[in-house]
């Protein structure tokens, strides 16, 4: 199956699913590295999808998958974010910060997935990424993470809602992720995010509300 995928048979789904089953049943995860390092885009897409489906079992290949976060294929970036969400540790500051950069990705689906990552990553992972950034001339990412880390702890709804109306789209997206993080205790910011004029934020907030069972005030 590996050879068939390498020869270009990826994309139909059946072969990828069969190979996934083999990995789930004990076939060495290290063998997936052959596909992750392939030159053919379709092969890499299939490999990263398999890695995303393996969840925490793909941890031995974390570095290989994290290196694909800037891949030209939107499918590769999308599924690499899945692997980052499940497997990132505080020591993985470089990979986490690259993943956070995808909040500005040109593809809407990748931006949406990056918001999912930001809204669900453990606080200790995001704090480590924040602390690794240079102190001088704080970036939008630093300002966004500062908002998220402070308001997630304080549950300051007014600050989150204010962030959702910020003039900068990046900061609005960090506020939306923060709204999702506090939705279990305060749904007001998420409900506000569902009204956003930013289609990415609106879709993300609506999807998050559905997961939390929040549909109205």
Image (cartoon, helix red, strand yellow):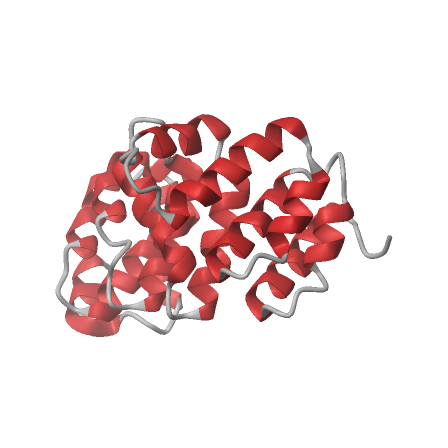
Quarter location, residue 201 = bottom right
Q: Quadrant of the N terminus?
A: bottom left
Q: Residue at x 15, y 70 (%)?
A: 7
- Please provide percent x and percent y for residue 119: 54, 44
Q: Nearer the viewer, residue 133 or 211?
A: 133
135 above or below 2? above
Query: Percent position (x, y) of residue 170?
Result: 47, 57
Residue 89 seen by the camera: no
Left or right, residue 170 beside residue 96: right
Q: Nearer the viewer, residue 151 or 34?
A: 151
Across and down, in percent, residue 125 comes to: 41, 30
Is residue 105 something that shows in the picture?
yes
Q: Residue at x 45, y 53 (%)?
A: 114
Residue 72: x %, y % from top left: 24, 67
Q: Residue at x 37, y 70 (%)?
A: 106
What residue is shown at x 28% (from left), y 56% (from top)?
47
């Amino acid at each position: 199956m590996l050879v068939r995928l390498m020869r270009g048979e990826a994309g139909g789904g059946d072969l990828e699913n069969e190979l996934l089953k083999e990995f789930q049943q004990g076939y060495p995860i290290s063998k997936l590295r052959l596909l992750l390092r392939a030159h053919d885009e379709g092969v890499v897409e299939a490999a990263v999808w398999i890695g995303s489906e393996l969840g925490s079992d793909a941890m031995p290949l974390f570095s290989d998958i994290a290196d694909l976060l800037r891949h030209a294929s939107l499918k590769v970036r999308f599924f690499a974010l899945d692997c980052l969400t499940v497997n990132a540790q505080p020591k993985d500051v470089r990979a986490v910060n690259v993943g956070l950069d995808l909040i500005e990705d040109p593809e809407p689906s990748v931006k949406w997935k990056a918001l999912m990552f930001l809204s669900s990553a453990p606080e200790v992972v995001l704090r480590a990424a924040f602390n690794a950034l240079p102190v001088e001339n704080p970036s939008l990412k630093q300002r966004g993470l500062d908002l998220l880390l402070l308001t997630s702890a304080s549950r300051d709804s007014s600050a989150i809602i204010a962030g959702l109306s910020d003039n900068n789209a990046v900061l609005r997206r960090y506020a939306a992720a923060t709204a999702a993080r506090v939705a279990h205790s305060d749904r007001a910011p998420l409900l506000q995010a569902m009204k956003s004029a930013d289609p990415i934020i609106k879709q993300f907030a609506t999807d998050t509300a559905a997961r939390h069972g929040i549909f109205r005030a």
